[in-house]
Image (tube, rainbow, N blue to C red):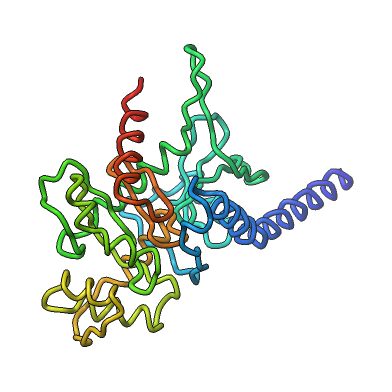
Amino acid sequence: MSAARDGDRAGGRAARLAAMKLRAVLPSLLAITLAACARGAGSEPAAARPAADAAPSLPPLADEEPVPPGDPRIELAAKMEGVRPQDLRASPVPGIFELVHEGEVRYISADGGYVFSGDLYKVTEQGDFPNLTEQRRRELRLAMLAAVPADQAIEFGPPDAPHTITVFTDVDCQWCRRLHSEIEDYNRLGIRVRYLSFPRTGPDTESWHKAEAVWCSQDRREALTRAKQGKRVEAGRCDAPILAHYRLGRRVGVTGTPGVVLENGEMIPGYLAPSRMLQAIKESEAAAAQP
């Protein structure tokens, strides 16, 4: 009996030690995998994309749906620093939970012993391999973008345009400025541009204050155009939504600017010329329409 009790105590210590190690290593693991994804994202040459400046970590947004007492996600989340029960949900694979962290989707075993970094594909009877992880990313992006009040965005193009893209922008970003200089070409091709703010340098920086000045201006469209032309915008005082946009950008997976989200939730991490953007939109829509 003594040996059994000793074994139980040893097992308990080992479990606690494993949980402590997981809490310590998970933030680093997620940061590494997020950085790797950012380096590999997109198909445009590096010269045609903005630098993806690392942004400081911010607290996660509150979730609307509370987790009921006794839910297994509570115990699992307690093993991981910075993870809430709301960040977890059951995956299509038995015994595996989905973990959403900083806009990225990861997977973790129900006992908290294994964390998986990578996309989950389903093998269908037709021989197709739909990417369930990317589908989930798109769902999350669309849900979060839909919650943004309409008056917080700066929009260029008619409301009834055939296509709308949401662009996370930095007024000092070279490729954001190029995109905006061609705004009439995007609109002419039927692409409406909906801007949200994402100063890459983070809070309380020059770019951040410029964004606040733009969003507090009487005429936001004119102010944004002036700022992207390198002209001064007089600072106003208002409850600018820059922090909310910035946190949202981190949540949907923006790592650099411009960060473009299509209407189906697909992320395009960088600048595309107007004609190339229209092509990307049509290709994405066609792919989504396939059974």
Which quadrant would residue 195 be assigned to in this image?
Answer: bottom left
Quadrant (top left, top right, bottom left, bottom right) of the C terminus: top left
In this rendered view, identify the residue nearer to me: 10 or 242.
242
Q: How many marks?
A: 0
Image coordinates of residue 126 in percent, x first then y, are 47, 12
> Viewed as shown, does residue 267 lie left or right of 215?
right
Quadrant (top left, top right, bottom left, bottom right) of the N terminus: top right
Residue, far top: 125
User: At x 60% / y 53%, what residue is drawn?
Assistant: 36
User: At x 49% / y 19%, what residue is drawn?
Assistant: 128
In this rendered view, identify the residue nearer to me: 274 or 195.
274
> Viewed as shown, does residue 179 lie left or right of 92?
left
In this rendered view, identify the residue nearer to me: 76 or 196.
196
User: At x 63% / y 57%, what residue is drawn?
Assistant: 32
Image coordinates of residue 67 in percent, x first then y, are 39, 49
Location of residue 34 with respect to 246 vertically, above or below: above
> Viewed as shown, does residue 264 lie left or right of 116?
left
Image coordinates of residue 283 in percent, x first then y, are 35, 33
Image coordinates of residue 127 in percent, x first then y, are 51, 15
> Viewed as shown, does residue 2 lie left or right of 97?
right
User: At x 30% / y 45%, what residue is drawn?
Assistant: 275
Residue, far right: 3
Location of residue 248 with respect to 87 vertically, above or below: below
